[in-house]
Image: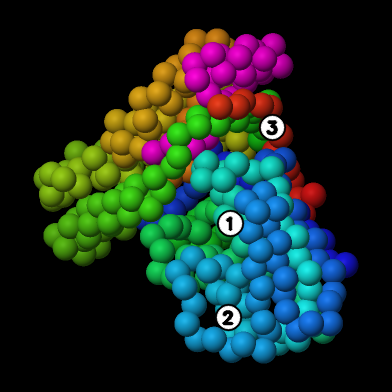
């Protein structure tokens, strides 16, 4: 039997930065996708998804070249075949989990990471891939294969696990030593608007940078600081200015958070930075519905040191930094404000723990 579990992902700092080649700080938490596979003699992958009551049969001798958009099962097979993989042994596969769907915790990426790990292990003579390489294969299968607008944060974080600083330009990943303290995740019950928000954020952010590059060929987005917003804002078309502001200031916040974590600084300071990040997401990226703003405000008023929306936005989940004394009050505050669910989570430090 082949068995894997892959964790959910939370972005703590740097939302809407990875597709601009700017860094993010993200971590994995103890909500999981579970994959179990037992061999069969039918030459098929019989995939059962009990959480959504769906069944999928993949015939291993069917070399189709037409793969529908977002069919990550087939794109994963195709990507690994391009690496020399050959699929002959059939399996009965069950994939389930407790990661909320379409809620910002990257349930789809967790599923694809588990699928890629299964496909690697299902080989007669499996090639050994590092966790980073699994992240690369997942990113290729989920994003690049379909020319999707997302960045690489989700796949790289989930495949490696822990609390990571990811340089999305070089794909270098650094494990961060600091602690965020107890965490609470709240499910708003509002569906995300992933593609529309990501597409607008990516296009507008990249167009802002392109406009600056056109007038300043030596401009380097990785070298910006907060003073560069004013320096270059007259070069950016008005409709892109909010995304230029968000890029500059969220980059600064992410670098400050990295320093706090590396120096094992205070969770109060990290909470302040998280709130600053959320304010920019609300006012410039416009990715936070008003009911979720109210939920997070109520959480802060009841002891949360920092709160922010998770993922692309438009709905989904929120995360709160709390302490042992405040966590129950924060959970109750989220629920009293209309959250569908709220619960304590913990960071995980191994991709398959």
- Expressed as whole percent of the image width and height from the top left, the position of residue 292 reads 43, 26
Quickly name the residue at label 3: 345
Q: Work out whether 222 lies above or below 98.
A: below
Give the residue at x 45% y 34%.
190
| Label 1 SS | helix
Residues packed near mark 2 inside 10 Å, few (<14), some (14 to 19) or many (20 plus): many
Tell me if residue 315 is in the magenta stretch.
yes
Picture quadrant where residue 247 is located = top left
The answer to which of marks 3 and 2 sits earlier in the sequence is 2
Q: Work out whether 205 lies above or below 60.
A: above
Quickly name the residue at label 2: 78
| Label 3 SS | strand
Q: Is residue 158 left or right of residue 5?
A: left
- Expressed as whole percent of the image width and height from the top left, the position of residue 202 reads 33, 54
The alpha-carbon separation of the residues under discs 3 and 2 comes to 35 Å
Q: Nearer the viewer, residue 1 or 30?
A: 1
The answer to which of marks 1 and 2 sits earlier in the sequence is 2
The alpha-carbon separation of the residues under discs 1 and 2 comes to 17 Å
Quickly name the residue at label 1: 109
Q: Nearer the viewer, residue 167 or 75?
A: 75
Circle 3/circle 2 CB separation < 8 Å: no
Q: Which residues are magenta?
A: 314-339
């Amino acid at each position: 039997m082949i068995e894997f579990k892959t964790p959910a992902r939370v972005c703590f700092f740097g939302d809407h930065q990875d597709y601009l080649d700017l860094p993010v700080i993200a971590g994995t938490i103890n909500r999981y996708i579970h994959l179990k596979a037992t061999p069969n003699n039918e030459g098929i992958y019989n995939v059962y998804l009990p959480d959504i009551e769906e069944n999928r049969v993949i015939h291993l001798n069917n070399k189709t070249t037409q793969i529908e958009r977002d069919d990550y099962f087939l794109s994963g097979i195709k990507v690994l075949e391009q690496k020399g993989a050959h699929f002959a042994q059939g399996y009965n596969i069950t994939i389930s989990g407790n990661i909320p769907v379409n809620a910002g915790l990257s349930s789809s990426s967790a599923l694809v990471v588990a699928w890629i790990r299964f496909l690697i292990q299902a080989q007669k003579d499996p090639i050994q891939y590092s966790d980073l390489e699994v992240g690369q294969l997942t990113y290729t299968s989920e994003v690049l294969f379909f020319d999707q607008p997302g960045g690489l944060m989700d796949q790289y974080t989930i495949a490696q696990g822990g609390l990571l600083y990811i340089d999305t330009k070089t794909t270098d990943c650094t494990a961060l030593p600091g602690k965020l303290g107890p965490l609470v995740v709240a499910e708003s019950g509002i569906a995300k608007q992933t593609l529309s928000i990501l597409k607008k954020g990516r296009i507008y952010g990249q167009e802002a940078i392109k406009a600056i590059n056109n007038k300043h060929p030596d401009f380097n987005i990785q070298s910006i600081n907060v003073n560069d917003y004013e320096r270059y804002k007259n070069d950016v078309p008005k409709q892109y200015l909010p995304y230029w502001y968000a890029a500059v200031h969220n980059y600064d916040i992410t670098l400050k958070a990295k320093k706090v974590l590396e120096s094992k600084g205070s969770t109060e300071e990290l909470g302040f930075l998280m709130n600053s990040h959320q304010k920019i997401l609300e006012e410039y990226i416009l990715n936070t519905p008003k009911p979720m703003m109210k939920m997070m405000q109520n959480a802060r008023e009841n002891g949360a040191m920092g709160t922010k929306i998770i993922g692309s936005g438009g709905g989904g989940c929120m995360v709160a930094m709390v302490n042992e004394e405040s966590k129950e009050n924060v959970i109750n505050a989220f629920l009293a404000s209309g959250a569908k669910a709220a619960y304590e989570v913990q960071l995980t430090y191994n991709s398959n723990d």
